[in-house]
Amino acid sequence: MLTKFESKSSRAKGIAFHPKRPWILVSLHSSTIQLWDYRMGTLIDRFEEHDGPVRGVDFHPTQPLFVSGGDDYKIKVWNYQTRRCLFTLNGHLDYVRTVFFHPELPWILSASDDQTIRIWNWQNRSLICTMTGHNHYVMCAQFHPTEDLIASASLDQSVRIWDISGLRKKHSAPTSISFEDQMARANPNQADMFGNTDAVVKFVLEGHDRGVNWVSFHPTLPLLVSAGDDRLVKLWRMSDTKAWEVDTCRGHFQNASAALFHPHQDLILSVGEDKTIRAWDLNKRTSVQSFKRDLDRFWVIAAHPEMNLFAAGHDTGVMVFKLERERPASAIYQNQLFYITKDKHVKSYDFAKNVESPPMLSLRKLGSPWVPPRTLSYNPAERAILVTSPADNGTYELIHLPRDATGAVEPTDVKRGQATSAVFVARNRFAVFNPSSQQVDIKDLSNSTTKTIKPPAGTTDIYFGGTGCLLFITPTHVALFDIQQKKQLAELAVSGVKYVVWSNDGLYCALLSKHNVTIVTKTLEQVSTLHETIRIKSATWDDAGVLLYSTLNHVKYSLLNGDNGIIRTLDQTVYLVRVKGRSVYALDRNAQPRILEIDPTEYRFKLALVKRNYDEMLQIIKTSSLVGQSIISYLQKKGYPEIALQFVQDPQTRFDLALECGNLEVANEMARELERPKIWSRLGAEALAHGNHQIVEMTYQKQRNFDKLSFLYLSTGDEEKLARMAKIAEHRGDFTSRFQNAIYRGDVEDRIQMFKEVDLYPLAYLTAKSHGLIEEAESILEAVGLTEDQIVLPTLEQPLKVPHPIVPTFQSNWPVKAAGHSSFEKALLGEVGVDEEAGADGFDIEEEEQEAAVARETLDEDEEEVSGWDMGDDVNVEEEVDFVNVESAEAGAGSSEADLWARNSPLAADHVAAGSFDTAMQLLNRQVGAVQFAPLKARFLEVYKASKTYLPATAGLPPLVNYVRRTVDETELRKMLPIIPRDLETVASVDLQEGYAAMRSNKLEDGVATFKRILHTVLVNTVSSEAEVEEAKKIIATAREYILAMSIELERRSLTTDSPDNLKRSLELSAYFTIPKLEVAHRQLALMAAMKLAFANKNYGSALSFANRMLANGGSAKLLEQAKKIKAQCERNPQDQIDIDFDPFAEFDICAASYTPIYSGSPSVSDPFTGAKYHPQYKGSVDRISDVTEIGAPASGLRLFVPSQF
Amino acid sequence: MDPFSAEGELLNIHSAFHSGQYQSVIDFDASALSPENKLPAQVLRLRSQIALGQFDESLAEPSIEEDSPDLSAVRALALQSAGKTDAALQLAQELAENYPENNTVQVLAATVLQAQDHSEEALALLSKHQGNLEAVSLIVQIHLQQNRTDLALKEVQAAKRWGQDSLLVNVAESWVGLRVGGEKYQSAFYVYEELASAPSTSAPLAIVGQAIAEVHLGRLPEAEAALTAALEKYPTDVELIANSIVLNVLAGKQTEELESRLQQVQPSHSLLTDIQEKSEFFDTAAAKFSAKVST
C-alpha cells in the first residue's frame, strides 16, 4: 500500500472524494468539515456550522455542492465555491449518520439514529420520503449506482434493500398513462403498514449477529458488502426475487466499521476498529493485504470514483492511499520498449514501426496475484529479462525471452531469488540487492553468486551505473561503485532519489526524487538541479541531450544547464519512456503505450542557443513560429537581444531590443513607426554613443531640438546646415538661438544685425568695432545719436576667429562603434552568400536515363562461366596443394580465410582481396583483355588493404588478423566472400557526380582522371544482382563517353590555331566534341563551344547546325538565347568558309586514338572492356580510354556477379 | 586461493594488464600486497613496461638477473621485444626445458617461441598448464594464427567450463567469434563494448576490439566514431592507426596521413610490410602482361 497523503486532525467520520479535482472532504468529530487538496497536501477550506460531530459528507457529482449531516440532527447543503451553507434540511430526530447524493436525481439520502432513512429533494428543499422499518439506529444508507434501490445497515443486525422505483415514478414528469399503469396505480400491490408505496422493503438480509455499521453496493454486479460489530465483513448476492449471503471475510479482530468494493478490481476493502485496513479477494474471500496503524481506529473508507485512490478516516485524521503502484515496469533497448501489462504479460513495442508486439511471456506466477511487478531490466546480449516484485519482501526472476512473440506462454526456465532490486550490470552479470541483509550480490546467468558487495549503510535501492558500475541509493546520497575494482568511484549528496534515468549516449543521468531532478554526469558530478512543486513521475532523454520529464500533469523539459519549461499538459499521469522527434512515447497507468505529440521547438531552440549552433537556430527561426514573451525574455535574460530581435513583431519591444543590441537600423525603423518624442530621444542618445551622427541629426530634427542640432552641425562641420539653422532661428524669432548660430558660424554681420533688432546697440557697436567694421560702427553711432568720444570702450583683443572645418565629417558617419555583430547575425548574413553560391552551382543534372550503350558483341554467358572457372583451375595449382594439406593435416596450420576467398569466387575482385593478384590479373586478362595493370595498382592495393583488420591480442605477439566479409551473416567457410570497398552505389553517387562536376566546371584533366578511376574501380569490383550488372555496364559506357569527349576537347585546346591546318583540325575536333553521348546539359556546353568556334571562323553552316541541335535539346534560357542569335545570323549565309571533315547528318563514331570519324560501314575494332571504337590499325594496342585493356583482344566479358553467391 | 580470482588482491592489476591499461599496472602500488603476491605483481609490472616498449628499463631492472624462472622468462620476453631474438629464443627454450610447470614461463616462453614461429614448441609447452587461463588464451591465439579456428573454439569452450567469469576467457572467446563470424560478431561486439565502456577496463585495446567488431558487422559509421574518438585520445596507438586505415579504405576515404603516421610509429607493422610485399608482388605479376602493340 502506498500512502499519498495524510492529515492530522481529530477523529474523521466521513470522507468524500471530489470526482474531478484532487480534493477530499473530511468531516470531523469536532464539528468541522475540511476540504483538502491531497495532491498538494494543503487545506483549502474549513466549514464550521454544524454543532457537534459531523458523520457524513458527500460531493455532488456535477454541481459545486456538497452535503453534510451531523449530530445536531441537521443536514446541510453547501456551495464550496461561494463557501457558504446554502440551506439546512431539518426533520431527523436524532444523529444523522450518513448522507449521499443520488447519482442523477436531485435527491439526498440520509440515515439516522431515529431509525429512519429519509430522501430529500435538494432543489425544492423538501422531504419526499421517509423509510421506516429498522428498529435500531440506521448506520448507513446508500443509493444503488444505477438501479432504483437503496441498501441500509442498522444496529438491528439487519441489512435492508429498498425498492424506490415508486418514488421515482411519482416524481418523474407525468406521461400518458396506459391502462395497465392506471390499474397498477389504483391497486398498489404492496403498501407498507403506513400505506406508503414510494419505498418498500425488497429484502431483509440477516446474518450479522451484531449491529451492522456499513453496507455498499458493487458498482456493476448484483453484490453487496457489509461490515458489522461482529467483526465480520459479509458478502451478499441478490437476484430479482431474492438475496442471500455468499460468504464471510474473517480477519478483523475488532468491530468492522466500513467496507466497499474496489471500483475496478475484484477486491473488497474494509476498515475496522482493530486499526487495520484489509483487502480481500472478492472471488476467494481470502485476505490479500492488510495495513495496520499503531494507534488509530479506522471509522470510514471511501473510494475515488475514477482513479485508483482510496481514503480512510481514523482517530487522528485521514489517509489517502493506493493499493499498488501504477507505474508499469518497463525497460528500453535501442528501438524497443519492453513492458509488463496489467495482466502481467511481457510485451514489446517497436518505436520505429510504432507497433505493439503480441504478448511474449506471462508472468502470472510472479509474486502474488494482486501485486504487480516493480521493475524490469533487459539484457540484449542474452535477450533475457530480470523482473522484480515487491511480493514476499521482494523477489526477482530471471527469464529468457522467446525468440518470437507467439503469445502469453509461461516461461520455462526461470531463475529466482530474494531481492528488492535486480538490474543487469553487464552482458552476463546482474546485481541483486537485499535491504534486510544490506548486501548486493553479483550473479551470473545461472543465478549463482560470483561476488558480494557491501553497499553503504542505509542503501535503499540500486540502479545500473554505466557498464560494470552500480549506483547505490541511500536516503541522502547516491554513490557510484565499480564492481570490478570493488571500490566507490564517486558520491553525491542528493536526497530521496527514487529513479535513475540514463541518457541515450550514457554520458549523463537524471536522478529523480519526489520533487527534484538532479542531472549528473556518468562520473556523478552534478550538472544541474531543479525543483518542482508537483510530484515528478518519470523522465526520458532526447537524443540531443535534453531531459524530458513528466509530473502528475505536465510534460516538461530541462536542458543540461538547468533551463527548463513546460512542453504540454497531461490529462492523465503517464510515464515517459522515449522521445523521438515530435513524439513522446509513454506508458499510461493501464500499461498501454501512448504517443503524445509535442512541439520540441522551444527546447531545441534553447539547446541550439546553449550550444551556439546558429545554423540550427536559423533553421528553427525560419521554419517554425517561435514567438511569445517567454522565449524573448529568455533570450534577453541570457544576453542574446540580437536573437530575440528576430522573433519580435511588436515595435516597442523590437525598439528596446534593437537598442540593447545596438542595432540602430532596426531601432530607427521602429522609431519611425512609433513616432514618439521619448523614443527619439532614446535613439538619439544611443546613436550619439555609437557616433552615428546622421541618426542623431534625424532624431534632433524629429524632436525639434534646435540647439542641439546647431551644435551637432558645428561639431560635424556642416556649415551649410548651420546657416540654415540660423535662418530657422531668425524665422522663429528666437534671438538666443540666432545669436548662438551666428557665433558658431562666425557671422559678425548677422550678430550686429540682431543686436540692432533687439535694441542692444551698445553690444552691436562693440561687436562692429571689435571686428573692425568701422562703417557699421559709425552707422550705429549715428543711429543712436552718439559720438565716439562719448563711449568708453574696454580694451579690445583680437576678434574671435571661427575655425573652418577641414574634413567634411558631416558627409558620412564617424567611425562608428563596431556594431557587435554576433556570430548569430553573421550566420544570418552568411547564409545569403551560401544561397547565392548554391544558385550559381545550381544546374545540377538530374540523373537521366542513359542512352543505350554502343553496340557490343553479344556475351555468351555460358562460355563466360566456363572460362571463368577454367581460369581458376589453371592458376590455382599451388592452392590446390594447400587444400590437400588442410584436409590431411590433423594439427598444424590451416589455410587462411583469404585463401578460401580466392577459391570460393571466380571474380577478379575477390582474388584481389585475397591478395592473389596474379590470378586476379589472369582473370581480368581473360575477361576483358587487360594487359597493362599499372593503372590498376592503386585499386588493387585499396581492395587488398580493406580486406582485413588487426585485432591486438596477447602483448608481445603480432595482432590477430581477421578478414572482413561482405557476407556478414555467413559462417559457412565455402560461402565466405570479402568485402570490396567502393561499391557500385558509391561509384554512382560519389565518383560519377565528381566527374560531372569536373565537366561542368571545365576541369577536364581532372574529369578524365576521375572517369578513368571510375573505370578502374568498376573493373575490380563485385555487385549483388543482375540489375546491378546492368547498372555497372551503364556506368562503364558513361565513363567511356565522357573520357572520349574530354580527351577530344583537351586535344583541341593543345593545338595552336596559327596554321590553317591546325585551324581546320581545331574546328573538326570541336565538332567531334559534340558527338559522344553526354548528359544533355553537358552536350549543350560542347555544342555551345563548337558553335562559337565555328561562328568565329565564319563556318556559318556548321554553326547553324550546332545552333539547331542546341535549340532542339532545350534547357537553360541563356544558352538558347545565344543559339537563337547565332542561328539568325547564320541563316543569312549558311556556308562554311573552311571545309572540315564533319558531316552533321551522318552516323559515325569517333576513333578514341586518332579522334577521327569512323563512319558506319567502315571497318573498326573495339575495346573489350570499355567498348570504345578504333580504326583497325590500333588493334593490339592499349585502350586509350581505360589504359588497361588491349584493343581487339579476345575476351569473355567482365564478371562482377555470380548468382550462386547470393 | 588463486590470487587472480574475483576475491584475490591481484584482481585489479591483473584485469588492468589484460585490458591493456599498462600504465596503471606500472603505477600500481604493490607495497600493500601479501608477500606471495609480490612476485606475480612484479612480473605483470615488467610485462607492462615491455608492452609499452620500455624494454631497456625492464632489462636494466636489477632483479631480472636473479635466479628466478619467472623473472628469467620476463627477460626472455624483453630480449625478444628488444630485437635480440636469438638470445631470447635460446633463453626461452632453456626455460621451457627446465621449468615447464611454471605459469609465467609457460606463457612468456611460449610467447617468445610463437613470435619466432616455433608454434609447435609453444603449444607443447602451453599444453602442460594446470588451470592457467593466460596459457589458454595464448593457445587460442596460436591456433587462430595457424587458422585453426576449430581447435581454438574447442579450447575456449573447455576453458569456459571452469573459468567463465574471467576477462581472459571472454576476450579469447571474442577472438574466436571474430573469426567465426555470423552471430558471433555481435557477441564479440558486446564483450568489447562492455570493456570499452567500463572505466576500469577502457583502453585502446578494448576500443579497437569494439571497432573491429563493428567493421565486421558492416556498421562502418559506428566503427568510425569509436576509432576517431580513440585516436584523439591515443594518437600513437599502433592498432588504432592500422585499423583506422582499413576503415578509411572501406569508407572510400584518404589514408595517406594515417599511413605515414603508422610508418613513423611502427614501420614493421604487418599492414605496412604486407602492403609493401603485395606492391612488389603486383609489379612482378603485372610485368608478365603486355599489349601486343606498344604505343
Image (cartoon, rainbow, N blue to C red):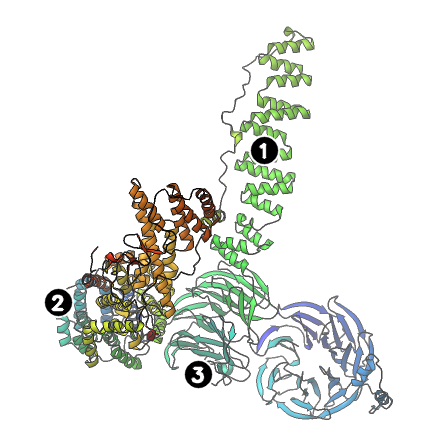
Q: Is residue A694 above or below residue B272?
A: above
SS at mark 1 in the image: helix
Could you tell me residue A941's position as x and y percent? 26, 62
Marks 1/3 same chain: yes
Which of A1055/A240 is in front? Answer: A1055
Circle 3 residue: A416
Q: Dot 3 falls on which chain?
A: A
Name the residue beneath numbered marker 1: A697
Q: Secondary structure at mark 2?
A: helix
- Residue A1162 seen from this side: yes
Disc 3 crowd rating (10 Å Cα; few below 14, some 14-19, many 20+) is some
Q: Amino acid at mark 2?
A: Ala
Whole-percent x and y of residue A1010?
Answer: 33, 55
The residue closer to the viewer here, B276 or A536, is B276
Q: Residues within 10 Å of mark 1 (few under 14, many from 20)?
A: many
Residue bearing mark 2: B87
Distance, label 2 to label 3, CA atoms, is 58 Å
Q: Is residue A1131 left or right of residue B289?
A: right
Residue at point 76% right, 71% down?
A: A78
